[in-house]
Image (tube, helix red, strand yellow):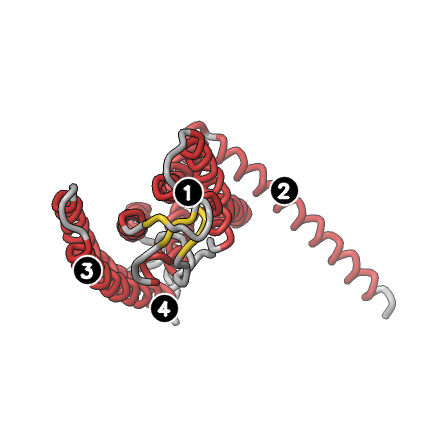
């Protein structure tokens, strides 16, 4: 394995994973297309035509983005091959080129995931039906994969509308795609850190800050979505809306809350960077790591001297 400011073998593996993700998402697109066809048979009149037109537009845009992801995955593989032919001391411009590639790939993949989730959420909402087994019951129709993408258990067929936030929170487990997005974000920030800081301790501190930020987003996002869905359901319930409307509001708020939280988190992080606060944190963390290293080195030297004096 050759390492030239990049683990080329790992980058190739990520490229293969992204290519597989593109194929999986294309399969999901085909499943959603089939769901749309079934919906057109089950729903006629009363706005069905407009809804189905919007759905087909979503599906076409989604398919185009999936093909774009496949192209981006191939670009990552080409990038690894090119890096193996480039001297490790290439000037900073090369870091900028690589970071632009990571950012484009991560942004494209994130858009696809958001679009896929939004489409699945819209289809689940469109397929909601009221139940009569107990107060507030709603029935859910559609493919298991579609419901899972929207944040529900794939096997869920009915639930009390007010219980949706708790169910979705319990079911919110990051999947391979979410971990892949996190890895791409960290790779993007890692390239920036390596180019911006020359001291190993500063790079380590910057990496620790970035890992904490990305992990914090993954952990906190479901709780923010839970709060948004709970508030929305409470507000719509207070208006006396039927269970189907209550459930639809909760699902929409869960999806919208996730988008808003990620946007706010990324925007706040950018403000930290622009204000210099993040750089100050990195420098402080780097200095602390250097001090710890010096103390450990001095202690080890003292132990070695003590041992040598015994002989």
Tell me where residue 140 appears, x and y as whole percent. Answer: 35, 54
Residue at 16% across / 42% down in the picture? Answer: 46
Q: How crowded is mark 2: few (under 14 residues within 10 Å), some or many (20 or more)?
A: some
In depth, the one of 235 and 274 nearer the eye is 235
Residue 291, percent across and down?
A: 66, 44
Mark 4 is surrounded, within 10 Å at the Cα level, by few (under 14), some (14 to 19) or many (20 or more) other residues, namely some
* Residue tagged 4: 9
Q: How dense is the environment of label 3, judged by Cα within 10 Å: few (below 14), some, or many (20 and up)?
A: few
Of tags 3 and 2, the one toward the viewer is 3
Residue picked out by circle 3: 38
Q: Which mark lies nearer to you, 1 or 3?
A: 3
Give the SS element for disc 4.
helix
Seen at 36% across and 68% down, the residue is 9
Count of number-bearing discs: 4
**Residue at numbered disc 2:** 288
Measured Cα–Cα span from mark 4 to mark 2: 33 Å
Please give the residue where the numbered disc 1 appears in the rendered image: 196
Q: Position of residue 293 (x, y in %)?
A: 65, 50
Relative height, residue 232 to residue 310 (above, below)? above
Which residue shows up at 47% across the image and 40% down it?
Answer: 224
In the picture provided, is 167 more to the left or to the right than 76? right
């Amino acid at each position: 394995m050759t390492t030239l400011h990049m683990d080329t073998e790992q980058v190739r593996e990520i490229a293969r994973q992204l290519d597989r993700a593109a194929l999986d998402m294309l399969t999901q697109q085909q499943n959603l297309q089939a769901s749309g066809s079934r919906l057109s048979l089950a729903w006629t009149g009363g706005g069905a035509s407009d809804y189905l037109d919007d759905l087909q537009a979503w599906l076409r845009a989604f398919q185009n983005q999936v093909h774009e992801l496949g192209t981006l995955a191939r670009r990552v593989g080409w990038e690894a091959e090119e890096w193996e032919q480039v001297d490790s001391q290439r000037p900073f411009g090369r870091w900028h080129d690589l970071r632009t590639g990571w950012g484009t790939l991560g942004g494209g993949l994130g858009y696809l995931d958001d679009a896929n989730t939004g489409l699945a959420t819209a289809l689940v909402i469109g397929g909601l039906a009221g139940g009569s087994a107990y107060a507030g019951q709603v029935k859910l129709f559609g493919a298991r994969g579609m419901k899972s993408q929207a944040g529900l258990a794939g096997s869920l067929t009915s639930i009390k509308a007010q219980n949706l936030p708790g169910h979705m929170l319990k079911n919110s487990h990051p999947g391979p795609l979410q971990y892949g997005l996190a890895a791409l974000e960290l790779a993007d920030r890692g390239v920036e850190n390596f180019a911006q800081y020359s001291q190993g301790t500063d790079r380590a501190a910057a990496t620790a800050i970035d890992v904490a930020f990305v992990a914090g987003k993954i952990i906190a996002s479901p709780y923010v979505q839970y709060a948004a869905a709970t508030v929305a359901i409470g507000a719509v319930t207070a208006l006396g809306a039927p269970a189907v409307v209550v459930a639809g509001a909760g699902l929409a708020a869960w999806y919208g809350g996730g988008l808003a939280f990620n946007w706010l988190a990324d925007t706040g992080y950018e403000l930290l960077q622009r204000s210099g606060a993040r750089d100050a944190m990195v420098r402080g963390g780097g200095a602390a790591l250097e001090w710890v290293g010096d103390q450990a080195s001095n202690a080890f030297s003292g132990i070695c001297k003590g041992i040598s004096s015994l002989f």
